[in-house]
């Protein structure tokens, strides 16, 4: 049997090109959907490849432009016939889920939580790594046993999350920190708490590079934590201005 190598290569190129076109179309559709409601997909704030080699550009592109965009689009769709809810700050919607109409409560929980979690997530990452400084460093030492213990405990908590979810550090108005986990797209905002920073342990956050090695991803992720931004969020929490 003869095998036409050129035909095979041409077909591969065609399929790869088609996949790329489809990805762009999906991203544009998601952006168009988010633009039609009160909630908006925030800009990433840095290039997709800014966190390499720890988080690859393709993962960042899919995560932001497709997964997060879908949460925002679904959230806007949930509130389109509820103008009173559409005008509320997201943190208030999440804190008052029990008061939300039953017909859209699950949509608000999953998609509002996903929007809040990811908005925080993009903010607290960046290139350069480094160490916590100033007040937030002192709080980490006081409440969480120092950076190394925090990292060890945080990674262990992330590994214990069954299925998909988040591992986060919460912060109170007086600056006290605590390590917590949440399943799915739940967030401490649902208990009127505030999140200082956190990591996404859904597989879509790491699967392209790390496959099922969540532990490797959790360890590598510390290289992209933007401690300057975490410090700003800590100051905002103590000032009472931290939202999501």
Image (cartoon, rainbow, N blue to C red):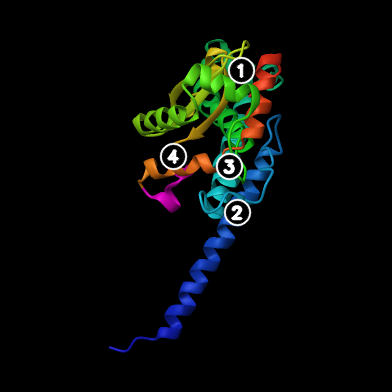
- Figure check: 224 above or below 234: below
Q: Earlier in the sequence, mark 2 or mark 1?
A: 2
Q: Earlier in the sequence, mark 4 or mark 3?
A: 3
Q: Which of the two residues, 220 or 205, is positioned nearer the viewer here?
A: 220
Q: Residue at x 69, y 16 (%)?
A: 84
Give the quarter of the figure containing the N terminus.
bottom left
- Return the residue at label 4: 218
Give the quarter of the figure containing the C terminus.
top right
In front: label 2 or label 3: 3
Q: Residue at x 44, y 52 (%)?
A: 208
Q: In the figure, residue 117 lies in which quadrant?
A: top right
For disc 3, the neighbor class at 10 Å (few under 14, some 14 to 19, many from 20) is some
The span picked out in magenta is: 202-211
For disc 2, the neighbor class at 10 Å (few under 14, some 14 to 19, many from 20) is some
Relative image position of residue 45 (x, y in whole percent)? 69, 43
Q: Earlier in the sequence, mark 2 or mark 3?
A: 2
- Can the viewer see residue 243 in this picture? no
Mark 2–mark 1 Cα distance, whole angstroms, equals: 33 Å
Residue 93 - label:
1
């Amino acid at each position: 049997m003869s095998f036409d190598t050129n035909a095979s290569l041409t077909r591969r190129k065609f399929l790869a090109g088609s996949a790329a076109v489809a990805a762009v179309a999906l991203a544009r559709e998601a952006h168009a959907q988010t633009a039609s409601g009160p909630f908006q997909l925030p800009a990433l704030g840095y290039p997709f490849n800014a966190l390499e080699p720890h988080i690859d550009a393709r993962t960042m592109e899919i995560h932001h432009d497709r997964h997060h965009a879908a949460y925002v689009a679904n959230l806007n769709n949930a509130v389109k016939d509820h103008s009173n809810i559409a005008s509320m700050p997201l943190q208030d919607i999440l804190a008052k889920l029990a008061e939300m109409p039953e017909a859209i409560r699950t949509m608000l929980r999953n998609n509002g939580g996903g929007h809040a979690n990811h908005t925080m997530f993009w903010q607290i990452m960046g290139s350069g790594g480094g160490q916590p400084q100033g007040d937030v460093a002192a709080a980490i030492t006081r409440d969480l046993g120092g950076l190394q213990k925090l990292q060890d405990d945080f990674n262990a908590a992330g590994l214990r999350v069954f299925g998909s979810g988040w591992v986060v550090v919460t912060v109170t108005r007086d600056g006290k920190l605590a390590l917590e986990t949440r399943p799915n797209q739940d967030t401490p905002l649902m208990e009127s708490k505030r999140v200082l920073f956190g990591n996404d342990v859904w597989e879509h956050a790491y699967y392209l590079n790390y496959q099922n090695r969540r532990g490797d991803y959790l360890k590598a992720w510390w290289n992209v934590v933007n401690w300057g931004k975490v410090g700003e969020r800590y100051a905002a929490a103590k000032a009472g201005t931290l939202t999501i």
